[in-house]
Image (spheres, rainbow, N blue to C red):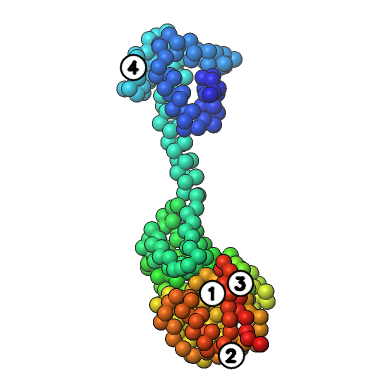
Amino acid sequence: MNSKNELWQKYYSGKISKEEFHTLKKTVNDSSDDELYTELYEHWSQFEDKDPLSEEKVDVMWGDLQQRLHPSVRFRLKRYWLPVAAVICMLIMGTWMATLYVEKNEIKQLACQSVTIHSGKEGPSMVMLPDGTKVRLNARSSLTYQQDFGRRDRKVTLSGEGYFQVKRDETKQFVVSTGVMDIAVLGTTFNVYAYEEKDFVEMSLVEGSVQVSVSKPAFKQLKVSPNEKVVYDKYTGKLELQRTDNRLETAWTHNELVFRHDKLETVLDCLERKFGIDFVIDDSLILKDTYTGVFDDESLPGILHVLTLHYGFNYKEKEDVIYIETKK
């Protein structure tokens, strides 16, 4: 516990915390007039090297202090209090200033704090942001934003995959940052795929328009229209704008998966996205085979059962990894 003198010194230097300030204020309120006079006089004596005030100036200060003192003060000034009157006035007038200063700093610190929402190992998870924007997070994904989101800007950071239905606001852009790609919109619907362990980042636009900026080579900006997607290769730095019907990109948000002459590699990739798993296969050649079909059974075991019947492979599951063994 800090001594009273240490609290005074922190108060004068402006380094006192909110808790310490309330302790000092309580100590002052609990002190008798004589105790407070002696204590404040000691503090006043620290300034004895300053030139003394004239009697005329003292009288002016006396009258001014009588008017400025807060009505909650429990004593009336006496003439012999004049040497410490400035210290008392500083304490009374500084009470609200110090409190506001401390609380303002606390509000700033709170505003700088982040809120992070994690989805589980099996997605999706729904998130409603303070501005009314709806975000569906896929498995193993997270969304981070500041406590004061929407006050001055609307910025979020995504790790994983998210489907955004952005509430329109003409005064504040909505920005999704992935560390590689920033997507800026006013109000629209789009899907972002940005798992850190993957070698690419993808944004596919369902409706509206977006501005995509890449903070890595090739440092480009693209304006994207509906049914287009931007794909950035992390290793080569290649940025592509492609046409899409958004079927594969948003399949994880629906209750069924539809494939038409798609490579098995694409099918497995969609399953990885949807269920938050990884596939390891002993023969990469099978990944080039195409598959056409509809999975209306949303369970992973049901889907894998259909694939094993079609391709004749076996699989083993360990934690979040599916090991596919092709028959020799």
Pick the front one: 36 or 76: 36
Residue holding disc 4 = 74
Mark found first going from the N terminus, 2 or 3: 3
Say which residue appears at 54% left-offset and 23% top-offset: 2
Residue at far right of view: 236
Secondary structure type for disc 3: loop
Instruction: Name the kind of residue labelled 1 in the image.
Output: Glu
Image coords of residue 143 (percent x, y): 49, 61
Q: Are marks 1 and 3 in contact (CB under 8 Å)?
A: no
Secondary structure type for disc 4: loop
Mark found first going from the N terminus, 4 or 3: 4
Image coords of residue 171 (percent x, y): 40, 63
Query: Closer to us: mark 1 or mark 3?
Result: 1
Query: Closer to us: mark 4 or mark 3?
Result: 3
Say which residue appears at 38% left-offset and 62% top-offset: 128
Q: Are marks 1 and 2 in contact (CB under 8 Å)?
A: no
Mark found first going from the N terminus, 1 or 4: 4
Residue holding disc 3 = 198
Say which residue appears at 47% left-offset and 49% top-offset: 111
Pick the front one: 245 or 149: 245
Measure the C-alpha gap from mark 1 to mark 4. 71 Å
Measure the C-alpha gap from mark 1 to mark 2. 18 Å
Measure the C-alpha gap from mark 1 to mark 3. 11 Å
Instruction: Name the kind of residue labelled 3 in the image.
Output: Lys
Residue holding disc 2 = 289
Mark found first going from the N terminus, 1 or 3: 3
Say which residue appears at 45% left-offset and 10% top-offset: 35
Residue holding disc 1 = 272
Mark found first going from the N terminus, 2 or 4: 4
